Image (cartoon, rainbow, N blue to C red):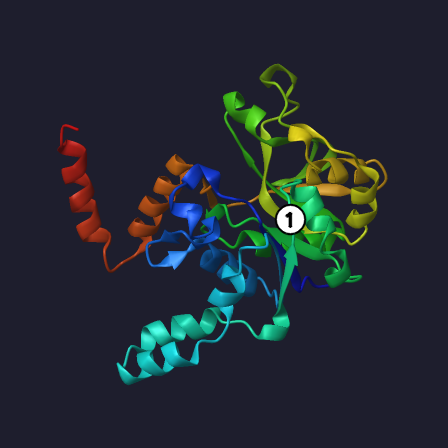
Amino acid sequence: MSIKTVVIPVAGMGTRFLPATKAVSKEMLPLLDKPLLHYAIEEAKSAGITSFIFVTNLNNKFPSLYLSKNKILESHLREKNKLKTLKMIRDITLKEKNIRLVYQKKPLGLGDAIHRTKKYVGKDDFAVLLPDDLILGRNCLKELISVYNKKNSNVIGVMSVDKKEVNKYGIVKGSIANGRTSKINELVEKPKIKDAPSRLAVVGRYILKNNIFKYLRKISKGAENEIQLTDAISLSAINENVFSYEFSGTRYDCGSKLGFIKAQLACAMLDNSIRKSFKKELEKILRRNY
């Protein structure tokens, strides 16, 4: 068994980052010198993914533009002897045959976005990666694929959240199988704090069996009047094993302004070329009386 295909939903309008996202889609917002999309592709490729399906809106062509070969730019970098940058550009480039754009005309939910990819996923099991959720540290998709290879089942990336924040997430109801792995009985989408079955929250990483499409056909609109992927996974858990895995990396919610700033700070601290200077500048900023 192996997972070679990833679905990456990028159809959102990025309203929380307007006016910046009026002209540039949210997944193209940069963390230092790389957009969110770049980090997502790096994680997927490192996990062995070779086929990339983007669910996008009609106006967003950025995934294919960013990931396609740019001969003029590569020639310029070669002439200027900027070989390190040239390597970075080449490493993220994908062959045209490995990129597929699927269009979602209206924001009808993650479940709807995934269901639209059925024709292109074919009969294979596949991964789902949400670029908004930046996970630094160990490769999250690779960790989930390892569990999938052992369990041959749906595997959902989760993390423990503060009790006061459970109403922002899909929450796992289940029992610990071993270590970081839990068997899921049900996923509860954005429960009230008093009704939350646990503090294990679903984050934007999934390994899905192909039969998830069968369950997506059976569900109706759920939370926020959208087709929720968590509802389909929860329905599948009635008939088959579904597992969650508490990944070991650190997740940053880049769909929010505060989360995006936190991710910028973390990326700066991981960049050896600027870390020392950055810390000094940050200390100066914190001492100022704004």
Instruction: In the rendered view, tell whether residue 256 sits above or below residue 82.
Output: above
Side (left or right) of 139 relative to 126: left
Instruction: Describe residue 127's horizontal placement relative to residue 64 as left or right.
Output: right
Q: Quadrant of the C terminus?
A: top left
Q: Quadrant of residue 242?
A: top right
Q: Quick one: label 1, few (<14), some, or many (20+) residues within 10 Å?
A: few
Does residue 179 appear in this view?
Answer: no
Point out residue 123 in the picture as x, y percentages from the top left corner: 80, 61
- Tag 1: amino acid: Lys
Above or below, comparing residue 131 to residue 97 in the picture: above
Most foreground residue, 181 or 123: 123
Residue highlighted by disc 1: 105
| Residue toward you, 80 or 241 | 80
- Is 62 drawn above or below residue 79 in the view shown? above
Quadrant in which the N terminus is drawn: bottom right
Give the residue drawn at x 32%, y 53%. 270
Rendered residue at 75%/35% (across/down): 234
- Residue 254 drawn at (x, y percent): 44, 43
